[in-house]
Amino acid sequence: MSSSVSRVTAAPSEQALQHFSKLLEYETDCWDVHHAMTNNRQDFVLLDVRSTECYQQGHIDGAVCLPHAKITEQNLAEYPPDTLFVVCCAGPHCNGTEKAAIRLATLGRPVKKMIGGVTGWLDEGFTLVEATVD
């Protein structure tokens, strides 16, 4: 008797290795981002690509607010061309990171997606900060 899990045969190990290794070229996770940011190893810019209003209500400390629709060469001008951008949005139910990654890649910028987004960040027990209003 087989389950719905094993009914479709798993890929051969070599193919699985290639697949999962390739994913890491496109994705990172909340733990790795948090570790880098809290251990003075941040070699990327964390872009919060949600709306400005969502960002102001609560965001990852150190994230830069740049809604995906506003990702343009002009808005990235302060960053060197080889800057790695890690994009995050609300969470798995949101495709803002994909929209942002497409814009960044179209502009020739290195990009990775932080899987889980803000929802994943909170699920891992990390905190958000509110934007200060001047």
Image (tube, rainbow, N blue to C red):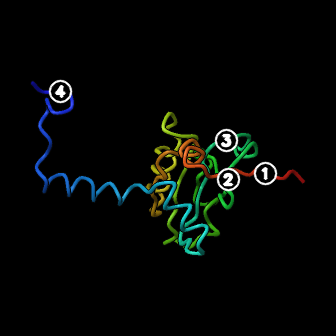
Counting other residues with Cα less than 10 Å from the Cα at mark 1, is it few (<14), some (14-19), or many (20 or more)? some
Q: Please tell me which of labels 3 and 1 falls first in the chain.
A: 3
Q: Are marks 3 and 4 in contact (CB under 8 Å)?
A: no
Say which of marks 2 and 4 sits in front: 4
Q: Where is mark 1, residue-wise? A: 131
Report which quarter residue 105 is drawn in: bottom left
Say which of marks 3 and 1 sits in front: 1
Q: Please tell me which of labels 3 and 2 falls first in the chain.
A: 3
Counting other residues with Cα less than 10 Å from the Cα at mark 2, is it few (<14), some (14-19), or many (20 or more)? many
Q: Secondary structure at mark 3?
A: loop
**Residue at mark 3 to residue at mark 1: CA–CA distance:** 13 Å
Residue 70 is situated, as x and y percent measured from the top left of the image, at 62, 48
Say which of marks 1 and 2 sits in front: 1
Q: Residue at x 66, y 58 (%)?
A: 64
Tell me the number on the disc at residue 51. 3
**Residue at mark 3 to residue at mark 2: CA–CA distance:** 8 Å
Q: Amino acid at mark 3?
A: Ser
Tell me the number on the disc at residue 88. none
In this rendered view, identify the residue nearer to me: 43 or 68: 43
The furthest residue to the right:
134
**Residue at mark 4 to residue at mark 1: CA–CA distance:** 48 Å
Q: Secondary structure at mark 4?
A: loop
Give the position of the N terminus as an image quadrant: top left
Counting other residues with Cα less than 10 Å from the Cα at mark 4, is it few (<14), some (14-19), or many (20 or more)? few
Residue 8 is situated, as x and y percent measured from the top left of the image, at 14, 32
Q: Where is mark 2, residue-wise? A: 65
**Residue at mark 2 to residue at mark 4: CA–CA distance:** 45 Å
Q: Residue at x 38, y 56 (%)?
A: 26
Q: Where is mark 4, residue-wise? A: 3
